[in-house]
Image (cartoon, rainbow, N blue to C red):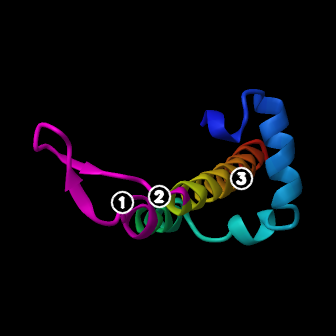
Amino acid sequence: MKRLGHDSAAVADTLEQKFAGRCSEWMTGSPTDWAQESFELARDKAYNLGQQTSDSRGNPAYKLSSRYQAQALAAAGEQLAKAGCRLAMVLNRSVQ
C-alpha cells in the first residue's frame, strides 16, 4: 500500500496518531466477527466499483474515480490500524 507511504514505521506512526483511542473498540468481538466485518467492507466499498465500461478490446473495465480511490485509501488505512490492534491483543493473550 505505497499510497500510505514508503516507510512502514512512518505509516504505523501516522495510523497510530490518526486512530488513537479506537483500539479498545476494535478489540471487541471474535476473529469470526472481524472476518465478517472485513467481508462486508469489501462487498460494500471495495467491490462497489460503479459503472462498468469496456476497454479498447471490448473487455470489461472500470474507471476508478478519485472519490473511490480516496475512500479506498482511507478504508485500507483503517483496516491496517484495526489489524495492528487486534494482532496485539491476540499476542498479549497468548503470553498470559
Q: In the image, is residue 83 above or below residue 21?
A: above
Residue type highlighted by circle 3: Ala
Identity of the residue furthest to the front in this view: 56
Q: Secondary structure at mark 2?
A: loop
Residue 19 pos. (x, y %): 81, 61
Residue 8 pos. (x, y %): 76, 30
Q: Secondary structure at mark 1?
A: loop
Q: Tell me the residue that label 3 is attached to.
A: 81
Say whether residue 56 is left or right of residue 46. Answer: left
Say whether residue 61 is left or right of residue 74. Answer: left
Q: In the image, is residue 96 above or below residue 20?
A: above
Residue in the picture at 34% in, 66% down: 50
How far separated are the C-alphas under marks 2 and 1? 13 Å
Q: Is residue 90 magenta?
A: no
Q: Nearer the viewer, residue 88 or 59?
A: 59
Labels 3 and 2: the sequence-earlier one = 2
Labels 2 and 1: the sequence-earlier one = 1
Q: Tell me the residue that label 2 is attached to.
A: 65
How far separated are the C-alphas under marks 3 and 2? 25 Å
Q: Is residue 61 magenta?
A: yes
Q: Residues within 10 Å of mark 2 (few under 14, many from 20)?
A: few
Residue in the picture at 64% in, 39% down: 3
Q: Tell me the residue that label 1 is attached to.
A: 47
Which of discs 1 and 3 lies nearer the camera? The answer is 1
